Image (cartoon, rainbow, N blue to C red):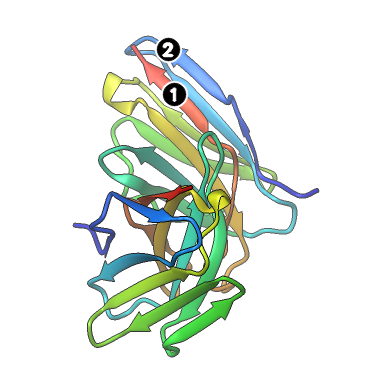
Amino acid sequence: DQQVKQNSPSLSVQEGRISILNCDYTNSMFDYFLWYKKYPAEGPTFLISISSIKDKNEDGRFTVFLNKSAKHLSLHIVPSQPGDSAVYFCAATWRDDKIIFGKGTRLHILP
Amino acid sequence: DARVTQTPRHKVTEMGQEVTMRCQPILGHNTVFWYRQTMMQGLELLAYFRNRAPLDDSGMPKDRFSAEMPDATLATLKIQPSEPRDSAVYFCASGLAGNTGELFFGEGSRLTVL
């Protein structure tokens, strides 16, 4: 039972354009939502998070939007750069520190 | 340069053998997580600890997997006996309790069971 779902296995975006990665969740009790980035042969690294009481958080080129009524969040990357090519994982936390991840979306930035 | 250290980085073994993976969390971190990455399931949570106490290991096949924290500087994940379906990359991550979910991951242990 996947409580955090990333339905797009891959996404290709032209360099300089906007990349939008999507994530859906089923549990209303999640506390925080996070995005992690993973390069091949490395562990995931934290990118950005958002509290369940907010609807937007921005950090440089990265913005996460949370739509609680739709149980949906998205990560926007503007402008997309070649170094953004990676696998992006959506994750969610409970108050007891449990953190679960989605299956990931592979982002390809095209030259 | 604080980081999570995992050993071994690569392990090839035969079905039925015991496998032990080790993790040194970042000093001062009080939560430790074990995840398994597969193509089909993405990052699956196997078990996690807070202050060395196991909080949830429901993601692990109980009959063959075990996870422990003998002390604050070492977490172990053991598989006995190993099976080909256990082939995956196993990640350890550490963090601070109540810190909004930011975890620091090791580089992973790639396990191949023949």
Residues tagged by mark 2 and mark 1 found on one chain of the structure:
yes
Q: Which residue is mark 2?
A: B13
**Image check: B12 left or right of B63?**
right
The residue drawn where x is 63% and y is 60% is B30
Q: Earlier in the sequence, mark 2 or mark 1?
A: 2
Q: Which residue reaches farthest front?
A: A111
Q: Position of residue A51 (x, y in %)?
A: 47, 82
Above or below, A111 against A52 in this view is above
Above or below, B17 against A51 in this view is above
Q: Position of residue B114 (x, y in %)?
A: 33, 11
Q: Position of residue B38 (x, y in %)?
A: 33, 37
The amino acid type found where label 1 is placed reads Leu
The residue drawn where x is 52% and y is 66% is A79
Above or below, A66 against B48 in this view is below
The part of the image, by quadrant, that contains residue A99 is bottom left
Q: In this view of the protein, can residue B88 be seen by the observer?
A: yes
Mark 2 and mark 1 in contact? Answer it, CB < 8 Å: yes
Q: Which residue is mark 1?
A: B111
| Spatial separation of the CA atoms under disc 2 and disc 1 | 8 Å
